[in-house]
Image (spheres, rainbow, N blue to C red):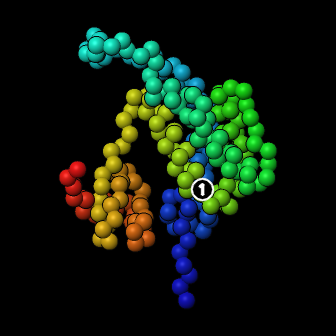
Amino acid sequence: MIEPVAYCETCLKPSRDRVHHGCRERLADQLRRIPTLYRALADELTPGRSSDGGRAGSRTAPLPVRLDILDLRARGGIEGILASWVRDLCEREQWEFPQYGTVEAAVDSYAAILIGNLGMLCDEHPAIREIAHEIAAVVRQCEALTTGEKPARRIPVACPCGTILRVTLDTPGARCTGCDTQYGHAEVLQLPMAQRTAA
């Protein structure tokens, strides 16, 4: 009898563990970096000048801060994402949800709580994939804003079942949500490009 193949909940690669060691370490590293990235965003709040050294063509005065960064640094931004998962953890474990006076203190503490309970989250939490993807997205967004690096472009490819998968050139693999087929890196990049449709 063939034993069924188990997959890592976060990256969907074959794994004996629910979340394999590499994904656990990546998530822990991202959670450790979030407080530092949060602080680094403060240096990026002031808008820069346009590339030609002059003012951008607008009839209204520019905002004194970058709203995208302000949204991440305000209550409900990075803090809100971390708080929602800490609140979920506290409710599941019947712990009291901790409150913090400042957004910065909340980001530091919520990240530490998630790191401290990462083993339990990886082994038991039904939404560990969503947790990992949200944390990775926050880190990518913060890094793009602090370094100016553009995120990898997503390319729509079509699974034979008709489902559209959005992949990057460095995608390690993907699982089709339509037919549950697992594709490796080479296989997913060999799928045909999805046809564009008129809007």
List x then y, in percent, for residue 82.
Answer: 62, 41
The secondary element bearing badge 1 is classed as: helix
Q: Is residue 131 above or below residue 37?
A: below
Q: Residue at x 74, y 49 (%)?
A: 90
Residue at the image point whose x is 50% and y is 58% from the top: 11
Look at the image and tell me whether residue 29 can be seen. Answer: yes
State which quadrant residue 184 falls in. bottom left
Q: Position of residue 37 (x, y in %)?
A: 55, 30
Q: Total number of numbered labels?
A: 1
At x 73%, y 31%, the residue is 100
Q: Nearer the viewer, residue 57 or 53?
A: 57
Work out which residue is located at the far right of the displayed protein and give it: 95
The picture places residue 53, in percent across and down from the top left corner, at 29, 11
Given residues 131 and 92, the one toward you in this image is 92
Looking at the image, is 111 positioned above or below residue 61?
below
Q: Quadrant of the N terminus?
A: bottom right
Whether residue 33 can be seen here? no
Given residues 54 and 25, the one toward you in this image is: 54
Residue with the most extreme bottom position: 1
Q: Residue type at mark 1: give it.
A: Ile
In the picture, measured across the screen, residue 103 lies left or right of residue 14, that is right
Of residues 157 and 5, which is closer to you in this image? 157
**Image height of 103 relative to 198, above or below:** above
Q: Residue beneath label 1, please?
A: 128
Q: Residue shown at 34%/65% (left/top)?
A: 163
